Image (cartoon, helix red, strand yellow):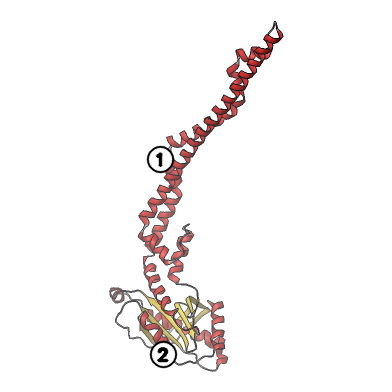
């Protein structure tokens, strides 16, 4: 199995874009497509989660109030028994000691029994009233609270949906790139694959073939093996797209090949031989081949056999030198 670095450029853009918008659970292209295809369901689930959370909060406060009341009633009942026992003991004392005058405590118990009974529980009653006000406020303002609590997630979802809608072509691109990655992973372990590679010069250089100046390139996949370097651009295009576009990916690969050639020549001239750099355009569908010199057009199922058909050219150490350079450069 080939060694891999990086991931699909289109997938990375989509995943990072959604994660930056707050969707932390987005990790893969599968997650991205699930979000896109099930947006309404996910949106409704978020709203329902907020509603359920609020309903549970109200229910919890109600249950807490019920528990407080039960505890208070039990404490009041126990105190009532204690006070009645105290009163009875005072009456027994009067009778046994033939007191002519009632003790002050007995007078208080007889005239202010309810006040003495409930005096220790003022804080308890206050807590009960406070809890009741809380859940009544939540109940009376239910819709307003739901709107407030869903404002941020709704905004997040709508921004994420707008992002996905604006990047629909990247989903198609990611599907193509990941299909190619699944093929490239099957190459022997003497091969190394880099995904979403970017190279640039400090200043533009002249590309004589087209009399253009080039400074940088982005390539979907770079394969480095004993038989050379393969630059692969993936396009998940339909026939209609191919016919209507003015953009030619074959030229993009060729351009990247020129930049790679200059970079390799400057850095690894000591190899004393021209390292083969081959350009490939992969289309997921069988499309009419574009006649472009030195750039091969293939479907994914033909990719590996094409790469492996070439004779070995580089030693293991030379391959590793190029790999180490590309790990830093890209």
Q: Closest to the observer: 132 or 290?
A: 132
Residue 71 place in picture, x, y as percent:
55, 31
Residue lying at the far front in this picture: please name it: 96
Question: How many numbered discs?
Answer: 2
Residue 118 place in picture, x, y as percent:
59, 22
For mark 2, give the secondary structure: loop
As drawn, 161 above or below 281 = above
Residue lying at the far top in this picture: please name it: 100
Mark 1, residue position: 143
Q: Which disc is residue 309 wearing? A: 2
For mark 1, give the secondary structure: helix
Label 2 Cα crowd, 10 Å radius (few <14 / some 14-19 / many 20+): few
Q: Is residue 248 visible?
A: no
Q: Is residue 42 left or right of residue 329?
A: left
Residue 180 place in picture, x, y as percent:
40, 77
Q: Closest to the observer: 246 or 327?
A: 327
Q: Is residue 149 visible?
A: yes
* Structural distance between the alpha carbons of marks 2 and 1: 68 Å
Q: Is mark 2 in CB contact (under 8 Å) with mark 1?
A: no
Q: Closest to the observer: 174 or 240?
A: 174
Label 1 Cα crowd, 10 Å radius (few <14 / some 14-19 / many 20+): few
As drawn, 288 above or below 141 = below
Residue 96 place in picture, x, y as percent:
69, 10
Give the mark, 2 or 1, whose residue is nearer the N terminus: 1
Q: Residue at x 46, y 68 (%)?
A: 12
- Observer-side mark, 2 or 1, equals 2
Q: Closest to the observer: 131 or 73?
A: 73
Q: Is residue 204 left or right of residue 282?
A: right
């Amino acid at each position: 199995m080939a060694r891999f670095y990086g991931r699909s450029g289109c997938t990375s853009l989509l995943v990072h874009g959604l994660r930056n918008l707050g969707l932390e659970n987005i990790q893969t292209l599968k997650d991205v497509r699930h979000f896109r295809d099930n947006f309404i369901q996910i949106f409704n689930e978020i709203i329902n989660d907020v509603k359920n959370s609020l309903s549970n909060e109200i229910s919890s406060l109600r249950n807490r109030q019920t528990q407080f009341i039960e505890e208070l009633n039990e404490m009041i009942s126990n105190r009532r028994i204690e006070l009645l026992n105290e009163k009875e003991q005072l009456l027994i004392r009067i009778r046994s000691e033939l007191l002519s005058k009632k003790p002050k405590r007995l007078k208080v118990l007889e005239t202010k029994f309810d006040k003495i009974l409930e005096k220790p529980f003022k804080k308890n009653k206050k807590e009960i009233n406070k809890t009741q006000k809380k859940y009544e406020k939540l109940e009376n303002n239910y819709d307003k609270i739901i709107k407030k609590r869903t404002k941020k997630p709704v905004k997040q979802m709508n921004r994420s949906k707008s992002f996905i809608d604006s990047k629909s072509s990247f989903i198609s691109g990611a599907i193509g790139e990941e299909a190619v990655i699944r093929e490239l992973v099957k190459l022997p372990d003497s091969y190394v694959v880099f995904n979403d590679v970017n190279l640039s010069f400090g200043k533009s250089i002249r590309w004589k073939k087209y009399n253009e100046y080039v400074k940088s390139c982005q390539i979907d996949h770079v394969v480095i093996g004993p038989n050379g370097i393969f630059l692969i651009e993936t396009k998940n295009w339909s026939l209609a797209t191919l016919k209507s576009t003015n953009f030619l990916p074959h030229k993009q690969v060729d351009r990247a090949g020129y930049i790679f050639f200059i970079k390799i020549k400057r850095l690894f001239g000591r190899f004393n031989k021209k390292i083969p750099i081959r350009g490939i355009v992969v289309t997921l569908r069988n499309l009419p081949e574009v006649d472009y010199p030195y750039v091969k057009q293939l479907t994914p199922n033909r990719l590996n056999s094409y790469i492996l058909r070439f004779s070995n050219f580089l030693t293991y150490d030379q391959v590793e030198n190029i790999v180490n350079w590309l790990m830093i450069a890209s």
